[in-house]
Amino acid sequence: MSATTTRVIGPAAKPARHRAILALVRGGVIRTQEDLVAELNRRRFPVTQATVSRDIRELGLLRVHDDAGPRYMAPVAELDVEQTMQRLRNAIREHVQGIEFVDLLGIVHTAPGCAPLVGGALDGSRFEEVVGTIAGDDTVLVIARSRPAAQRLLLRLNSMSQEDA
Amino acid sequence: MSATTTRVIGPAAKPARHRAILALVRGGVIRTQEDLVAELNRRRFPVTQATVSRDIRELGLLRVHDDAGPRYMAPVAELDVEQTMQRLRNAIREHVQGIEFVDLLGIVHTAPGCAPLVGGALDGSRFEEVVGTIAGDDTVLVIARSRPAAQRLLLRLNSMSQEDA
DNA sequence: CGCCGAACTGCATAAGTATGCAGTCGAGTT
DNA sequence: AACTCGACTGCATACTTATGCAGTTCGGCG
């Protein structure tokens, strides 16, 4: 009964749908699973609430309360991305709370525990301007090669936090 | 209609109940509001699911999924300025062995393993003078915003190690 | 002292979410 | 081609959570 080396998916657009769900939840306010169903249908994902309920569990979405009632949020982390740049962009958008430079030193504030991830993404990107990084728990120290380099870096990183997916 | 300077509560043990709820959620696995109702009743808080639902919103509890289904989690605590300062004072008195500055960089030597705690306390205090901190195992690197800032910081931190509780 | 309004709660129920079950689809096998 | 198996889904429904409304309690005030 071991036999089949199979693996993959069934007859589904599941991965794409999951990406869409994450984007929706990050992008706007989703209060109910029906909201999600509606948005997904609008985007040519014909699904029902039951499936969305399962998707939400699989994606590990959080349900939180704000002034207007419960809503869904994306989890803090996301794994495996192909291109390091995309990964860095994501890391910045998702985990970075602020960036500032003092002379050659860049201080990147992140969500608690996320500094290693962000630092890793930075390292991976192999910026010419970066000599190296040190990641603590919620702060990454970036050492720039020169002042102009620091300036370029700041601009570049800041712009990343605003580009869209 | 402004008149009454009043404020207080109604006829309730609400605050105590809220504390109990937080303790319960932090301490064990609470999967449903009924779980909570049961535990609360056991502890002499006669409430119903409706009230618990409201409490959960007020406390900002999170609903997450694990392998066994949805459950509640407590949000990460938030401290006020007073508590934060006290926390820093304690951290310094108990775990810090020495502080020195080299230019904009402050090096704080701590007992082994205590750097993250001290760094956290420093971050929490949100000193104007501090750009950020990075904690290793027994050393915290503090980056000051300027030289005067560094100097002020040194004085301030040193004085803290001597104030009493 | 009786009235008034705010805080708080339970009840009943609306609103929303999770899930057992049965059916579909495709890939790999026989 | 027919069979088998696992991934995936919708339906119907059980289960949970949220909330409109009405009632209680308490403190302040006329």
Image (cartoon, coloured by chain):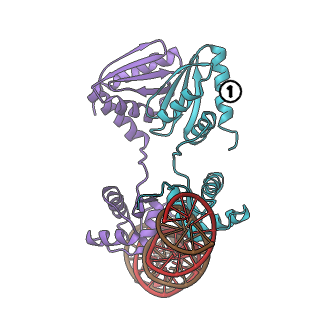
Chain colours: A cyan, B purple, C red, D brown
Residue A52 in sight here: no
Residue B148 in sight here: yes
Image point (58%, 16%), residue name: A103
Q: How many marks?
A: 1
Image point (37%, 26%), residue name: B136
Name the residue nearer the viewer: B81 or A127.
A127
Q: Is residue B49 above or below residue B127?
A: below
> How many C-alpha atoms fall within 10 Å of the one at disc 1: few (<14), some, or many (≥20)?
few
Q: Position of residue B20 (x, y in %)?
A: 32, 61
Image quarter where the N terminus of chain A lies is bottom left
Image point (37%, 41%), residue name: B83
Name the residue nearer the viewer: D17 or D9.
D9
Name the residue nearer the viewer: A7 or B123.
A7
Name the residue nearer the viewer: A84 or A3.
A3
**Secondary structure found at label 1:** helix
Residue B67 in the figure: left or right of residue A159: left
Q: Position of residue B57 (x, y in %)?
A: 48, 63
Image quarter where the C terminus of chain A lies is top right
Instruction: Please name the residue that numbered disc 1 is placed on.
Output: A155
Q: Position of residue A43 (x, y in %)?
A: 72, 61
Residue type at mark 1 is Leu
Residue B133 position by quadrant: top left
Q: Position of residue B138 (x, y in %)?
A: 32, 24
Question: Residue under mark 1: which chain is it in?
Answer: A
